């Protein structure tokens, strides 16, 4: 037993003498650092997914060779030499000269490796609550979803770069109490401001920068891979503040079931983010993403969204209709079809499609349901209901310029300009933060109208100077500049703007009568009533059989108290040509009110109210004033 113990002790001493332990330590430390580096570089460098496995195999294979090499050889000041056995050293009878041991290069290397390993291990050991420091003050986690990268080498999958992003955003938006999800509009604005039209350019570093601009704590970054009919979607949930990867996700499926794969990915990410608040089975179906199981239907829908964003509503409707022809229950397509009709005042069709979507609102995601409720309020209720839903929308994501614009415009309709202004200003603030120009001229001119109506002419003029840089020669902008110049008494500037305005409208194929009526409105708003009446008269002479031109002049004569009787004659002529036009009825009712014929006026205005396609605040105010006059008359 003593001999065995002595043999083990000699072997142990020989291992130390030959520095085998030091080599093993350095090898293990180096291997750990290499593996960490490979794991962090696989995504950014687009290395094959089996790269870490290959590295582990190579490092494992090299380990025994390193041990054997350290036993046989040693590094000396004279170079690499074979290590002498203890017996050979004893035969030489050479007594070692005692020297003071200094710090060796190998010692420094080991210390540095220990520091690096400690840094890499610290967050893994001590940072177990990864979400402790990324929650916003309101307790929610803010999330941005980047477009996914197509790594299939097949351009047919390009559509799903945005498709996966949109579906993930919809799914995560189902939990507004726990998650604050930036919408597609916010992220697209950031990408466009950086000129990133090719999604291959969106690296984790770029995604992190964009996420910080959007003031979120977490971003989702991923890609699509294909092998035959098999599809794999990879995604990483990353800390936007420091780039740490919270979790990687990998979902496999087939190309004909891509939406099922996306739904699975959505559920995994959502459940991980919610941590202990997982989706209950009883509400799973109610909170599922409203989508379609048909890739072809989704493709048409996606193309429709692109046309819709360019304000090409006829093209958008064609694509949405194709999507619904494939899947009639595709409720999101129904909603967009409704809005595209409404934006062109085709209210009959707009209402029809809105109701179809509204009937299925309980199946929608939280944000989609709010937008559907807003659309329903726009067509069937009042601006006050619209405002309630819009406020909920911007509470979920305060980086949605369009939502703030509609909210501001709704206040503008109600003539509550003081409340409209901060919402319109918010649109420009978001765009400025993104480093991009507003999406359309109305982001400037609607704010300009509010400034004008509150007497803030200097702010209005400064605003239009900015608008000129983004929308040079825009006729809507020229219209507002003409009104402002006239209101300030700058008739010379106004005349220059008017000539430019005429030229552009002619290029846009407007008729001379329509252009002249538009200039009449400019003079009316600029408080030049004589010039306004002159242009209204000219417009009617240019198109004498047009009831719209008749009503334009009739309304001006009545509302400005210039010739109420003449205005009523013109209103009656217009109604002979279009008896069901609620605008013309409003004009006649208001004229009768001005003549003191309150009961007749009330009957006409009530008929106008019944015929209106959507809420009209001016008509509402007229009706209220006439009702009050009738009531006062009855009391007297």
Image (spheres, rainbow, N blue to C red):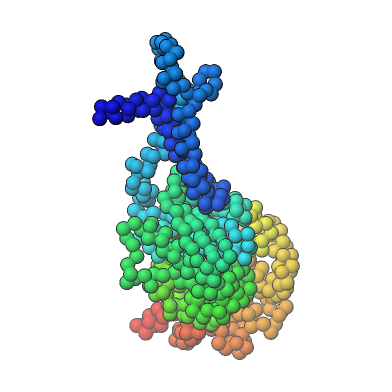
Q: Is residue 451 above or below residue 581?
A: above
Residue in view at x 44 percent, y 63 percent? 266
Query: Which quadrant of the figure contains the N terminus?
Result: top left
Q: Is residue 485 above or below residue 388?
A: above
Residue in view at x 57 percent, y 88 percent? 579
Q: Is residue 86 visible?
A: yes
Query: Which quadrant of the figure contains the C terminus?
Result: bottom left
**Side of 18 relative to 303 (left or right):** left
Q: Position of residue 333 (x, y in %)?
A: 52, 74
Residue in view at x 74 percent, y 65 percent? 503
Q: Nearer the viewer, residue 380 or 271?
A: 271
Rendered image quadrant of residue 108: top left
Residue in view at x 63 percent, y 80 percent? 548
Rendered image quadrant of residue 495: bottom right
Q: Position of residue 385 (x, y in %)?
A: 41, 71
Q: Nearer the viewer, residue 388 or 209?
A: 209
Q: Is residue 159 above or below residue 331?
A: above
Q: Nearer the viewer, residue 433 or 322?
A: 322
Q: Position of residue 39 (x, y in %)?
A: 48, 46
């Amino acid at each position: 037993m003593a001999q065995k113990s002595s043999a083990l002790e000699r072997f142990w001493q020989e291992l130390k003498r030959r520095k085998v332990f030091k080599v093993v330590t350095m090898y293990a430390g180096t291997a750990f650092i290499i593996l960490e580096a490979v794991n962090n570089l696989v995504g950014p460098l687009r290395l094959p997914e089996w790269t870490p496995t290959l590295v582990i195999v190579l490092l494992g294979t090299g380990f025994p060779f390193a041990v054997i090499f350290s036993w046989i050889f040693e590094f000396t000041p004279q170079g690499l030499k074979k290590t002498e056995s203890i017996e050979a050293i004893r035969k030489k009878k050479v007594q070692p000269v005692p020297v003071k041991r200094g710090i060796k290069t190998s010692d420094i290397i080991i210390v540095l490796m220990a520091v690096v390993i400690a840094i890499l291990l610290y967050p893994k050991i001590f940072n177990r609550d990864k979400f402790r420091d990324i929650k916003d003050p309101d307790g929610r986690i803010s999330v941005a979803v980047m477009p996914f990268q197509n790594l299939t080498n097949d351009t047919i999958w390009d559509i799903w770069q945005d498709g996966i992003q949109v579906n993930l955003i919809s799914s995560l938006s189902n939990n507004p109490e726990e998650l604050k999800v930036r919408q597609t509009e916010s992220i697209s604005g950031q990408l466009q401001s950086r000129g990133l039209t090719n999604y291959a350019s969106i690296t984790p570093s770029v995604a992190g920068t964009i996420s910080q601009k959007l003031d979120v704590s977490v971003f989702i970054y991923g890609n699509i891979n294909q092998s035959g009919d098999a599809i794999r979607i990879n995604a990483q949930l990353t800390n936007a503040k420091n780039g740490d990867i919270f979790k990687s996700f990998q979902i496999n499926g087939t190309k004909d079931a891509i939406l099922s794969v996306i739904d699975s990915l959505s559920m995994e990410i959502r459940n991980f983010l919610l941590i202990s608040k997982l989706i209950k089975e009883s509400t799973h179906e109610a909170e599922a993403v409203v989508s379609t199981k048909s890739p072809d239907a989704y493709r048409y829908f996606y193309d429709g969204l692109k046309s819709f964003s360019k304000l090409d509503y006829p093209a958008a409707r064609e694509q949405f209709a194709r999507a619904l022809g494939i899947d009639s229950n595709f409720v999101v397509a129904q909603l967009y079809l409704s809005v595209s009709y409404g934006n062109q005042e085709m209210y009959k069709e707009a209402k029809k499609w809105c109701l179809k979507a509204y009937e299925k609102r309980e199946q929608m995601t939280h944000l989609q349901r709010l937008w559907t409720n807003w659309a329903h309020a726009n067509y069937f209720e009042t601006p006050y209901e619209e405002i309630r839903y819009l406020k909920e929308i911007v509470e979920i994501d305060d980086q949605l310029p369009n939502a703030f614009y509609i909210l501001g415009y709704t206040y503008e309709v109600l003539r509550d300009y003081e409340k409209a202004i901060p919402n319109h200003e918010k649109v420009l603030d978001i765009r400025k933060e993104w480093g991009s120009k507003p999406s359309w001229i109305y982001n400037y001119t609607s704010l300009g109208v509010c400034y004008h109506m509150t007497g803030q002419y200097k702010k209005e003029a400064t605003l239009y100077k900015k608008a000129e840089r983004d929308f040079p020669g825009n006729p809507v902008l020229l219209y507002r500049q003409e009104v402002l110049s006239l209101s300030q008494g700058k008739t010379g500037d106004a005349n220059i703007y008017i000539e430019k305005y005429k030229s552009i409208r002619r290029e846009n194929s407007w008729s001379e009568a329509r252009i002249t009526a538009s200039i009449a409105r400019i003079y009316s708003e600029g408080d030049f009533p004589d010039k306004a009446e002159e242009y209204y008269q000219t417009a009617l002479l240019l198109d004498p059989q047009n009831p719209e031109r008749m009503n334009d002049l009739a309304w001006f004569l009545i509302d400005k108290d210039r010739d109420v009787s003449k205005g009523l004659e013109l209103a009656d002529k217009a109604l002979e040509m279009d008896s069901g036009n609620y605008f013309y009825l409003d004009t006649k009712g208001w004229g009768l009110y001005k003549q003191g014929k309150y009961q007749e006026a009330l009957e006409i205005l009530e008929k106008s109210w019944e015929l209106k396609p959507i809420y009209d605040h001016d008509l509402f105010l007229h009706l209220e004033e006439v009702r009050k006059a009738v009531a006062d008359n009855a009391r007297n």
